[in-house]
């Protein structure tokens, strides 16, 4: 079911997109069902769930994160058993070195979630030989002021809950919004800064035209793999920073954790900018230092 030069066919990508939407919606259903109950919360880096002296309190994990990833992995095992899965909560890699990798973040914005702050997402991204080709992001809110799934595939339209979405920002709004790692006003930029606490939400909001552009310091693959195809389908641009500067993103490459180590996608963390092409260019110039 492949196309020329090993490019996946539209038939295959449509099938993968349908499954990604199903999985993102599953994440959303589980997240909503957990709201209002007292959650088990632990912090990464500590087996007992509480950080030792000097450790960070910035990386919580709820019981729902793990439960959702287990469900998603089980569904994928039924639908695409040969594909690889890169999840935030579990290290298991069922199809290492396969052309297709599913990058799963069961809850992006966990700090918001465990505090009851209603801005978080469930993100499913699919890479083909490192290229982001399918994305589905369930968001707790949206341009339609309700939860729903933004989704797209390479060669297809940006959609929201199976309906094509054509973002059209109001031309009367002269100063729009941008996502930044720090919500600090900057007179050098021509937009107001917002920080949502979720990279997946910000990617989806960029695609939907709610944010003009967004920048991330060191995102993990699962933070942005679901959102990148949305932005590209909306006509946006994605750049990452390397030794050459801000470079157009074509694929996410495995990186070794240490010199001489085995390259792994789990270790990819690059500064990233995505959004409207002119805004990406503007932010890249301002953030070149």
Image (tube, helix red, strand yellow):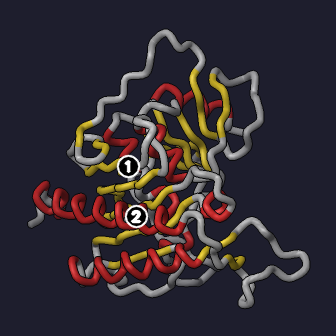
Q: Quadrant of the C terminus?
A: top right
Identified at 21% across, 45% down, the residue is 155
Q: Is residue 232 visible?
A: yes
Label ID, residue 29: 2
Residue 121 pos. (x, y %): 49, 56
Q: Is residue 162 above or below residue 219?
A: above
Q: Kindly indicate the quadrant of the structure image that contains residue 11.
A: bottom left
Element at label 2: helix
Q: Is 122 positioned to the left or the right of 11 in the image? A: right
From the top left corner, tell me how far across and down residue 86 is, in percent: 44, 75
Residue at point 41% right, 57% down?
226
Residue 94 located left or right of residue 86: left
Q: Which residue is depicted at the point 75% across and 65% down?
A: 58
The answer to whether 157 is drawn above or below residue 75 in the figure is: above
Give the residue at x 48% y 51%.
Answer: 140
Count of picture labels:
2
Q: Label 1 neighbourhood size at 10 Å, few (<14), some (14-19), many (20+)?
A: many
Q: CA distance from mark 1 to mark 2?
A: 10 Å
Residue most extreme to the right: 53
Residue 255 vs 242, above or below: the answer is below
Q: Which of the image's four quarters has the N terminus? A: bottom left
Q: Is residue 30 left or right of residue 74?
A: right
Assess disc 2: are there few (<14), some (14-19) or many (≥20) residues with their C-alpha within 10 Å of its C-alpha.
some
- Residue 36 is situated, as x and y percent measured from the top left of the image, at 59, 64
* Circle nearer the N terminus (1, 2): 2
Camera-side residue: 289 or 18? 18
According to the image, label 1 marks what residue?
148
Residue 268 image offset from top left, x and y in percent:
54, 66
């Amino acid at each position: 079911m492949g196309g020329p030069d090993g490019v996946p066919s539209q038939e295959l990508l449509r099938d993968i997109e349908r499954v990604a939407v199903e999985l993102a919606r599953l994440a959303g259903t589980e997240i909503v069902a957990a709201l209002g109950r007292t959650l088990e919360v632990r912090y990464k880096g500590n087996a007992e769930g509480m950080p030792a002296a000097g450790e960070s309190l910035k990386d919580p994990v709820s019981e729902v994160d793990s439960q959702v990833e287990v469900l998603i992995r089980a569904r994928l095992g039924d639908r695409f058993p040969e594909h690889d899965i890169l999840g935030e909560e579990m290290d298991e890699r069922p199809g290492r070195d396969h052309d297709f990798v599913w990058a799963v973040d069961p809850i992006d914005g966990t700090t918001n979630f465990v505090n009851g702050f209603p801005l978080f997402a469930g993100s499913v991204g699919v890479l083909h030989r490192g290229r982001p080709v399918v994305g589905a992001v369930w968001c707790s809110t949206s341009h339609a002021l309700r939860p729903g799934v933004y989704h797209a595939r390479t060669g297809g339209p940006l959609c929201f809950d199976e309906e094509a979405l054509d973002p059209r920002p109001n031309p009367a709004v002269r100063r729009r919004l941008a996502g930044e790692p720090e919500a600090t006003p900057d007179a050098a930029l021509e937009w107001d800064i917002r920080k949502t606490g979720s990279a997946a939400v910000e990617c989806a909001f960029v695609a939907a035209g709610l944010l003009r552009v967004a920048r991330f310091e060191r995102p993990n693959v699962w933070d942005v793999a679901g959102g990148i195809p949305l932005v590209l389908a909306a006509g946006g641009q994605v750049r990452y920073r390397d030794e050459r500067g801000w470079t157009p993103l074509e694929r996410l490459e495995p990186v070794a954790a240490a010199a001489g180590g085995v390259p792994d996608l789990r270790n990819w963390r690059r500064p990233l900018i995505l959004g409207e092409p002119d805004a990406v260019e503007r932010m890249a110039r301002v953030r070149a230092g």
